[in-house]
Image: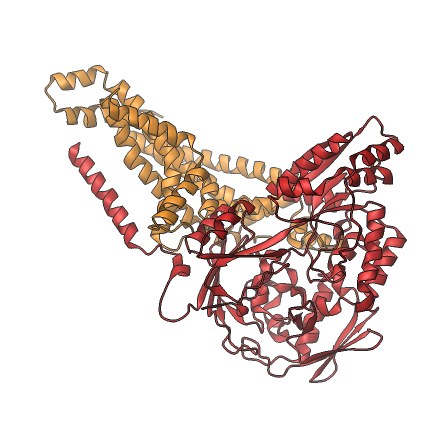
Amino acid sequence: MSKYILKRLGMMVLVVLGISLIVFTIMNLTPGNAAQMILGQSASPEQVAKLEAELGLDQPFFVRYFNFWKGAVQGDFGKSYQTSLPVFEEILTRFPTTLKLATAAMFIATLIGVPVGVISAVRQYSLVDGVSMVTAMLFASIPSFVMGLLLQLEFALNLRVLPATGAASWQSYILPAVTLSTATMATLIRMTRSTMLEAIRQDYVRTARAKGAAERSVVLNHALRNALLPIVTVIGVDFGYLLGGTVVIESVFSLPGLGTLLITAIRMKDTPVVMAAVMFVTIAYSLVNLLVDIIYAFIDPRVKSQYAKG
Amino acid sequence: MKKVLALLLAAVMAFSMAACGGNGGSSSAAAGGDGPRTSMVYGMSAEPSTLDPMNIASMNTFTVTYALYDTLTAPDGSGNYVPYLCDDVQVSEDGLTYTIILNKEVKFQDGTTLTTEDIAFSIQRTIDAGWAADMARYIESVEAVDENTVVMTLNAPFNGMMGSLASPFFSIMSKAYCEEKGDEGLKRAPMGTGAYKLAEWVSGDHITLEANEDYFAGAPAIKTVTLRPITDKNTGMIALEAGEIDAFLNVNPSDIPTIEGNPDLKLYSCDAASVLSLNMNVEDEILSNEKVRQAIFAAVNKDDIIAGALEGLGTAANSPVPTVCAGYSASTPGSVYDPEQARTLLKEAGYENGLSLTLCLKEDNTNQKVAQIIKSQLGEVGIDVTIDIMEGGAWTDKVYTNGDYQLTIGSWFSMFLDAYSVMYSQFHKDCYGGTGNITHVTTDELSGLLDAAAAASDSDKVAAYDAVCANILEHAYQLPLVYQQTTITTSAGLKGVEPSPLGVYMFKDFYFE
């Protein structure tokens, strides 16, 4: 197992290196000039050239890329072109908001999505199944910003029970987390339903029933445990995605997260912030996926034995 | 299974109850209490990247620096710029010497007294940095001649000097503090003479300002101002309606009827200090032909743009000068919509079979709608327009840095309410390309007219800028489209709000009843 983890961590380093090169190249190739963006449209060419020299933007591509890594391995990701703040500090300030949001959304999605999927499968073609399938379809189809605005209108304006914007209290996270959870919830409902339907038709489930096991035990211990593998995969992948993909929700709910930082940095050609933020998300995503793979071993002894071999 | 469901429902109920029990968290804007409120929340469309007043490139963030710093002059409400932070500004007869008399009562927020050294240092700092070059270009030297007097010498008479001194670039700073902090330090730790001081800046979340109780013009009524970046206009509107913020600029025009029907909100609007315009690159092979440019002038119907793209908010522009700027004349004859004339002009130019042009555009919903209407109008006279929408950085590169475009739509924002602030940078040959003159007109005639207008006496200013506008319109360099409206929506209880054409608001003037 530890060998497997080490191998995965080694692969992660390669992924991070590859992504850093891709992002740095894209930032370099896209039109727009960081110095011009900082100084504004009315800046003179001399001012722009002076600032470019100050920021090191006049150096060749590979020198800048090398300098980025030279700093990064020492924990120094440089300063933001825009704010002059240390990039790492800025990311650490913003990441908790995104992490809280993604965790809350994942928690809500799992807490509701998996049980609803199980019930749907157990009572296939019943009214409950029909309602949950239509709801899942609806949740998967509504764009998140529309869902966000609708929830704001109802809970912040009409009922006035929750704040519409900001991150001042834990209540502020309820509406964005619910909004963010809907798409994942829809996937989980459908995924749980289909894998459970497959599982409850297996011979071992029939055997369990024949042995006289209680229905609850059959569903939860025999069927669900075997159906969990793809569900955990979805949870892991979606959680990783949420860590870097909450841009729209952060904008709609005016939350100071990593997504808004990244999108502003991309617009302003703030390469140090973009690089560090993407590296951060990449590592977080890779670690979550590694964690999911480790969890597999606990869910499915067959996987554990494979790890032992490999 | 039943137990699980029961637990789940209980958890959801507890969660909802707890949520209902809260007061809405951040809704400090809705907080009550005895007496008038003394705190407010201001929603701004973007977070400032720096609070050094000298190098802010975004108009939106000037509001913050105007709260922290003061300027030597300020508008008096009737369009004139008068002394503010100083006791007096005496201008010599030839208009070349400005004698600034110190106000000895003024103190910085760190308790030190404002000196003439600080004033001279602040002006020199802006000149040295090359910022605000269009305003600073006239200043030959600035010197603190004694403890009471600063003398600023100009290299040519400039009727926009009093207005320039009111722009945030000429905010007065403490020399000792600036030297202690350095340029980097000043970005996040501002300290001026302003009515507010910076209490907290949580990156991406909020900036908190606290009243400067020792402010030389009297402590402000609003003691705490929280500024929150809200980038989405729909979110801004919801936050206003929910009472989470007290003020927000330029809501979507479609939300205005909702605001007018809401007794808790109040909308203020006025003409903006900018003109939405269609710029033409006169160095382009096709557009170097004046008749083609004049044909475009005749083919565009501005009323359709106002009705179709701006929901009726705005008026057809007759001049490149904003209506609110000194030097504007309502009698300047604007372009006349005449598609038949446009076709004739195109024929005379040798394009009777039509021609193709590209309109490059910075991504923006309103501008895109405007561009679609222009495309359809030009199509009717035989000009096939391709719209090329690009991200802000790419657009700036293409239009300002490289200048390799044909048509573009944009607005030039003035820094103070004077025609000079929009006209010089856009049309003078010295500002060619990146510094503002994107039409690339370099005629000595137009530059001479601009120089004369900048030096004209107040009584001659309108006539001087009329001559400038006549030249621009005759040669069809830039087609002024619309005088757009700028709005601020506030909670109804907030008083002291005057709509600002610049979109800059002074919190010290605000109070709650």
Task: Look at the image and tell me whether residue A280 can be seen.
Answer: yes
Specify the quadrant that holds the N terminus of chain A: top left
Q: Name the image colouring.
A: by chain
Compared across the picture, whether A257 is left or right of B442 comes to left
Specify the quadrant that holds the C terminus of chain A: top left
Q: Residue furthest top?
A: A203
| Shown colour of chain A | orange
The image position of residue B341, as x and y in percent, is: 83, 36
Compared across the picture, whether B295 is left or right of B239 comes to right
**Above or below — where is A16 with respect to B466?**
above
The image position of residue A73, as x and y in percent, is: 52, 47
Depth check: A20 or B332 in front?
Answer: B332
Q: Quadrant of residue B194?
A: bottom right
Q: Quadrant of residue B195?
A: bottom right
Task: Look at the image and tell me whether residue A230 can be seen.
Answer: no
The image position of residue B396, as x and y in percent, is: 69, 45
